[in-house]
Image (cartoon, rainbow, N blue to C red):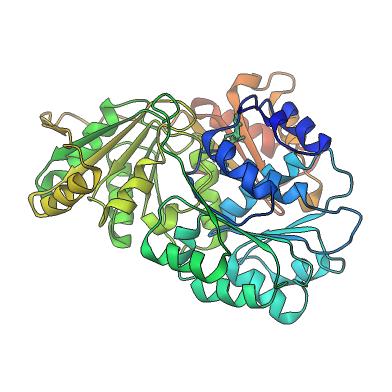
Amino acid sequence: MTTFDSLPLQPALLASVQTLGYEQMTPVQAQSLPPMLQERDVIAQAQTGSGKTAAFGLALLQSLEASTIRLQALVLCPTRELADQVSKAIRRLAANIPNVKLLTLCGGMPLGPQLASLTHDPHIVVGTPGRVQEHLKRGSLHGGGIRTLVLDEADRMLDMGFSEAIDDIVKRIARHHQTLLFSATWPEAIRAVSQRLQHDPVEVTVEAAPEARPSIEQRFIDVEPARKPEALAQLLATERDQHALVFCNMRRDVDAVAQELDRRGFSALALHGDMEQRDRDEVLVRFANRSCNVLVATDVAARGLDIAALPLVISYDMAHDPDTHTHRIGRTGRAGQAGLAIALCTPREKPKAENLEQVLGTPLSWQALKLAPPRGKTLHLAPMKTLVIDAGRQDKLRPGDILGALTGEAGLGADDVGKIDVFATRAYVAVTRSLANKALERLRAGRIKGRNFRVRPLG
Ligand code: AMP
């Protein structure tokens, strides 16, 4: 049986599942929920899009006692983006259980406000290992009542060097707890973590049924190194609707490739791991709101990105190893939408392709790319443009205020206003590119709540 009501879940959780419109369990949920609800340790192979968050979210909420003011569940994630996404998902699942307090604690954020919100223990903490460890060490977080520990995207946490922090966290929390480990890949290091931290775990590996597996078309293209920029631009111009993620192996190439694409008329942005959090947020906002159509990133920077199914993922360089390749292509074709993953491969990179072929056990599909003769510059700009307002939640600014200011009398049509993101001290709004100046004028004319906030266009 694969319906949720076949599980011994409390009515409040069944109600949430129903509200969210989940009818059937996904394969990962069907296999992992029964043992998790029996409080067994579970190690599950699960990718983003498999429904893993709801699986461990339901498990940890089922055993939570909201009337006991104590930290009872800890979810560790590799990145802030993922932690935010997981927090949101758990909040939605907990919507029918009164008084559940969940806190997100991530690095890269000031400690002060976190300490202030920790005067009472939350029931659930979702966070990145370094920061959670710091709070446990300081005594601002108390792990003695933890019943469920979740390691989400454990392989990525290890890749990012969080292994020691995780071991130290485990030493600082209740000895008897359930450990749920979710990981897209199971290299030796993951098995070692499981052996160290789990007790007689139930293993869940899901061979996705063909119809459930997102259909991803993979293509490999032979290209000389010097022709890569041209090949990339041509692929972006001809494939799909150009909303694409491009992976480079090296940080320095990320900038160069983004600049080159920009020069060729795309709205391209670079994302690296060591960007300031604010710049990183800004890039992600612009990609998500369609005012940037090509995001160029390293694998590290792209970890945990909360980006909905992308139509196209391109490896500008062949991934160093098959696991990385798998992570990359997992960014496309999510949630039942077909995706396309293209990899550029130079003669020197051929051994990587051969290795991948061996690991996959199926021949790679090669495609010849005929480079078109250069024409004049064609613009492939993103459909939207972002305006940034130097005011945010701290100024009590809400998305509705911005929408209202833009769409009032003789203003923009509602269709010309895209995603609005309000942060603590700034807000971003996407507007139809050709109307950006008009939108800017309206916002500058002091129409947001009658106040004069600084507004400027990005890009
Ligand atoms: P995740 O793998 O946790 O990132 O979840 C992927 C997406 O699937 C999320 O948008 C969930 O809301 C959705 N989802 C999770 N479980 C189910 C389900 N049983 N039926 C339909 N959608 C689901």
> Between residues 142 and 254, which one lies in front from this camera angle?
142
Q: Nearer the viewer, residue 41 or 399?
A: 41
Q: Is residue 456 visible?
A: no
Q: Is residue 201 above or below residue 314?
A: below
Above/below status of 427 relative to 217: below
Q: Which one is in front, 121 or 302?
A: 121
Question: In the figure, residue 418 lies in which quadrant?
Answer: top right
Residue drawn at point x = 34 percent, y = 25 percent: 240
Is 311 situated above or below 121? above
Residue plotted at (65% across, 49% down): 36
The image position of residue 175, as x and y in percent, is 70, 73
Residue in front for this viewpoint, 89 or 188: 188
Ligand 1 shows up in the quarter that is top right
Left or right: 203 in relation to 299: right
The answer to whether residue 418 is seen in the rendering is yes
Total marks placed: 0
Would you place residue 214 above or below residue 73 in this image? above
- Pinpoint residue 365: horizontal percent, then vertical percent: 17, 33
Q: In the rendering, at what x and y percent does residue 168 appear?
A: 60, 77
Left or right, 296 with reference to 60: left
Residue drawn at x 69%, y 54% is 39
Seen at 70% across and 24% down, the residue is 407
Question: x%, y% of residue 303?
Answer: 46, 54
